[in-house]
Image (cartoon, helix red, strand yellow):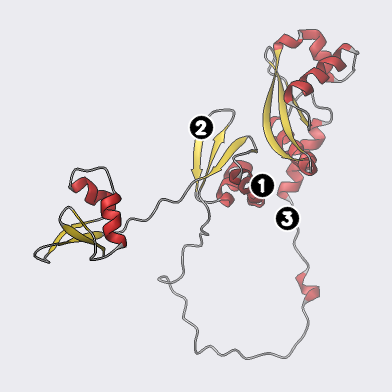
Amino acid sequence: MARGIIYLILNKQTGEKYIGNTTLAMNKEWVHHIDRSKRMSSEPLHKAFRQYGTHNFMIKELDACNESEFNEKTNYWIAQYKPEYNPDVEKTVTSMQEKRSSTPIPDVVKKVKTSPVKRTNTSNLIQWNEKNRGDGKKTGLKIKGKNLETGVCTEYTSAREAATQVTGNPNNRANILSAARHYRIAYGHRWQILEEKEKKKAVFGVDKKTEMIGPRCESINAAVRLFEGTDKNGILKSLKNPGRYSWKGYYWFFG
């Protein structure tokens, strides 16, 4: 499926805007608009080209997506920017606002069927309380988004959190996660997955000669720093082969 971009054209003199989409390269789309303006197109953007001169306009990429998502994402950005040069912009904004505010409630009453009551064995269930209730948060891949307009980078604990904060709709998480996996642009941000940092594992050394327990460190890096070193190969070899190889006069173990 063809991929394309959502873009913004800005009048640098008046601040008026236009939102469009294309599967062409940005420079080709720009030339296409200029050509239509020269052919006396009656569209508001092309009229403005003739009035102010194309040198007073700039084009900027906002988003990238599959061609099948063009309408949805174009409408999203129109609702965000309310571009003056787009026809029927008020109609589009109103439609998006109604879509966000309306949450259909299923008529569950009609779907309920009368059935014999089944008794459940509750002997193996644990009583809910404040200790085991959890915090209601779902874990996920940590991701980072760079706002292409401001340059600000923000880290999120999951794609759902990012979608909620950036777009106001958690259901957009799939688009954001897909963009993050390929370092692509979505909703005006460039996304990437952050690698989970390796959890620290405590280590300790046993004196090679006396077999007495020696230094204890909160991590491998801490042990290397203790001996004022930078190379971890020695301690890693000792940890992978418990009791066979020593490092700095000690056999090293996790614990």
Q: CA distance from mark 2 to mark 1?
A: 20 Å
Residue 131, compared with residue 169, is above or below; it is below
Q: Residues within 10 Å of mark 3 (few under 14, many from 20)?
A: few
Q: CA distance from mark 1 to mark 3?
A: 21 Å
Question: Which residue is label 3 attached to?
Answer: 103
Compared across the picture, whether 186 is left or right of 127 comes to: right
In this rendering, would 206 be left or right of 79?
Answer: left
Q: Residue at x 84, y 28 (%)?
A: 87
Q: Measuring 17% from the left and 52% from the top, which residue is drawn there?
A: 248
- For the residues carrying marks 2 and 1, which lies nearer the camera in this image? 1
Identity of the residue drawn at 41% across and 50% down? 197
Task: Find residue 97 and report its horizontal and vertical position in percent.
Answer: 73, 42
Would residue 222 be found to the left or right of residue 16 on screen?
A: left
Q: Which residue is mark 2?
A: 152
Secondary structure under badge 1?
A: helix
Q: Amino acid at mark 3?
A: Thr
Measured Cα–Cα span from mark 3 to mark 2: 32 Å
Instruction: Give residue 193's position: percent from left, percent from top.
Output: 53, 46
Tell me the quarter of the picture where residue 244 sits.
Answer: bottom left
Considering depth in this image, is 78 or 178 the residue closer to the camera?
Answer: 178
Given the image, on which type of amino acid does mark 1 rest? Asn
Above or below: residue 110 compared with residue 172: below
Is residue 90 left or right of 138 when viewed as pictured? right
> How many numbered marks are there?
3
Quarter of the image where one finds residue 45: top right
| Closest to the observer, 97 or 25 | 25
Q: Quadrant of the N terminus?
A: top right
Q: Which mark is residue 175?
A: 1
Marks 3 & 2, CB-CB < 8 Å contact: no
Q: Within the image, what quadrant is residue 176 found in? A: top right
Compare marks 3 and 2 and give the one earlier in the sequence.
3
